[in-house]
Image (tube, helix red, strand yellow):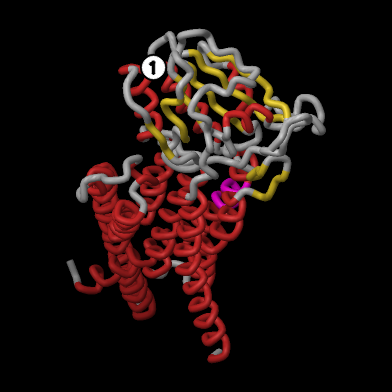
Amino acid sequence: MSEITTARAKEIENEQMYTRHVRIDRMFIVLLVVQYIAGIIGALVVSPYAWQGKERVLHMHVWVAILGGAGIIILPILMAIVRPGSLMTRHVIAASQMLSSAMLIHLTGGRIETHFHVFGSLAFLAFYLDWPVIITATVVVAADHFLRGIYWPESVYGVSNPEWWRFLEHAGWVVFEDIFLILSCVIGRREIAASAMRQAEVETLTEQEQLKSAALEMALAEMQATA
Amino acid sequence: MKTRRWIITGALVFASTVWAGTVVAAYQAIRRFESTPGTAAIAPKTWPARSRVQRAGGAWTLVMLVHPHCSCSRASIKELEAIIDKAPRSVRTHVLVYRPTDFPAGWEKTDVYTAATRLRRTSVLIDENGREAKLFGGFTSGQTFLYDGDGRLRFEGGITLLRGHEGLNSGRADVIRIASTRDGKGAHPVFGCAISTEPARGEKR
């Protein structure tokens, strides 16, 4: 394999990955906005008001959904617009997506079912075919559990004095999914690299054939001219 | 071109600050809201004689006060359901649903009310203007009292871990243990909306 073909293959692979990253950044803009709106609607439906006898005030969850949700999505959306396809954008999106999960879990009163959002989000992040992004998301989940386990254990484990290693049990299930997602990212990346190599080879062969044809036509033209 | 770069960098720095600040502020706000208990009850040590709630002689009785529009009380009702499943069948349960009389009829018919009516071996009573809540000395939705067969108070407090959070907690566990062993006393913080404790007509505060 010539160096030119290898370099061209790398170029094609990078182009394809960049296009994919930009497309998925855009997908996450939509997802983050949809989640934001869903969080507000959910808060308004589930717990619109806090009551004091006959008096009612807007529930804290509604404020958190509106202000907290906006704060969480502002950076990833801005980065996806001004720095699409960049490494930092992907990692900020991963962290924000996990923070959105944590917020949704809180807004639903810690429902077990809402925890599935974490696993769904990891699967979406795997679309990037960039396994460090999944690691970033996992670190955010583990850090959230670890810190809350220290400062507010009731909110995450349901008991006030959990064992120090308890967060590892929760993070372990995320790691379980990560193994398969990271594997799929690596395989997907190899397939794209192989496809880019095939395209580069075809391009090289086509170029060589075109050169041969041009040389042949030139030789024929010279023969006709001399005859 | 240089100006545009500065604007973008400035916007990103601003967004990063907002992003980090939001995470910390939202965490603190939720934590403060969910882990701050409501006003604890000042419950009489024996069954309030003037209560309209019928206490079967010799039977242990569980009483819960709820505000029908308190979303956090859904979790209290869920926990009450768990207690009813685990506690002895002889325990009688009453859910007292707050309703101000100057509000339109049906105001109290919320999902919390409906969930309460679906509980087994439970009677749901409307507590007009919080008269019964006052007699039982409760101020917060989700406040639960367990009285023994002689009408003595054995447990007072909430049966959720945090505001609106379902799941195993010492309040729920205490009620089940005391009702099952017929021994001991217990108390737990209560999490929920405030129930009006305005004096009912003809009642002294």
The answer, for residue B115, to whether it is visible in the render is no
Quarter of the image where the C terminus of chain B is located: top right
First to last magenta residue range: A35-40
> Is residue A109 inside the magenta stretch?
no
Q: How crowded is mark 1: few (under 14 residues within 10 Å), some or many (20 or more)?
A: some
Against A176, residue A88 (above or below) is below
Query: Percent from the top left, x then y, of residue B115?
Result: 58, 22
The answer, for residue A51, to whether it is visible in the render is yes
**Residue type at numbered disc 1:** Ala
Query: Percent from the top left, x then y, of residue A192?
Result: 31, 55
Q: Nearer the viewer, residue A39 or A129?
A: A39
State the residue position of label 1: B87
> Is residue A37 inside the magenta stretch?
yes
Against B187, residue B54 (above or below) is above
Query: Percent from the top left, x then y, of residue B129?
Result: 72, 31
Number of numbered discs overlaid on the protein picture: 1
Q: Quadrant of residue A140?
A: bottom left
